[in-house]
Amino acid sequence: MPRKKESPIKTSVKSGNFRSTKKGAGMTAKGVKAYRAKNPGSKLKTAVTGTVKKGSAAAKRRKSFCARSAGQMKKFPKAAKNPNSRLRQARKRWKC
């Protein structure tokens, strides 16, 4: 039996699940809640935006996100050069 094709996550701001690039891109708390409702067992969380204690779980999440998104910067040089791209704005919001 063929697997059911999942629809990709859409980054439309209209739904209220994602921030606009002007507001820092990334998912809103509402968007995370909706995603977790559709995907039980998910551990998705919102961005780490505040100041964090060195070595804390939040600091480790930030470090991990920054490392992953740095890889995206290499893979998508066009987005990396554009200061208004979702990638760059999300990295700014996460304080990478």
Image (cartoon, rainbow, N blue to C red):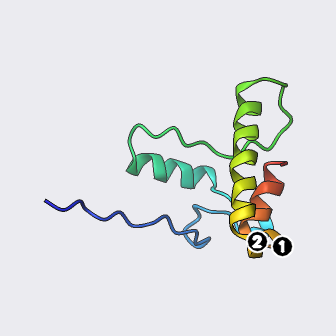
**Residue 33 at x, y percent in the picture:** 51, 48
Residue 79 appears in the rendering: yes
Tell me which corner region of the image, top left, top right, bottom left or bottom right, holds residue 11. bottom right
Residue 43 or residue 33, whichever sits in front: 43
**Residue 46 at x, y percent in the picture:** 65, 45
* 16 left or right, relative to 9: right
Tell me which corner region of the image, top left, top right, bottom left or bottom right, holds residue 15. bottom right
Residue 17 or residue 90, whichever sits in front: 90
Residue 86 or residue 38, whichever sits in front: 86
* 77 left or right, relative to 40: right
* 17 left or right, relative to 53: left
**Residue 55 at x, y percent in the picture:** 79, 23
Identified at 75% across, 40% down, the residue is: 62
Amino acid under disc 2: Pro
Identified at 70% across, 45% down, the residue is: 65
Residue 24 appears in the rendering: no
Quadrant assignment for the N terminus: bottom left
Secondary element at image label 1: helix
State the CA–CA distance, disc 1 to disc 2: 6 Å
- Callouts 1 and 2 close, C-beta under 8 Å: yes
Q: In this view, does 16 lie above or below 50?
A: below
Identified at 49% across, 64% down, the residue is: 9
Residue 81 has which mark? 1
Q: In this view, does 68 lie above or below 62?
A: below
Q: Which residue is disc 2 drawn over?
A: 77
Secondary element at image label 2: helix
Mark 2 crowd level (few <14, some 14–19, many ≥20, 10 Å Cα):
few
Mark 1 crowd level (few <14, some 14–19, many ≥20, 10 Å Cα):
few
**Residue 31 at x, y percent in the picture:** 55, 55
Amino acid under disc 1: Lys
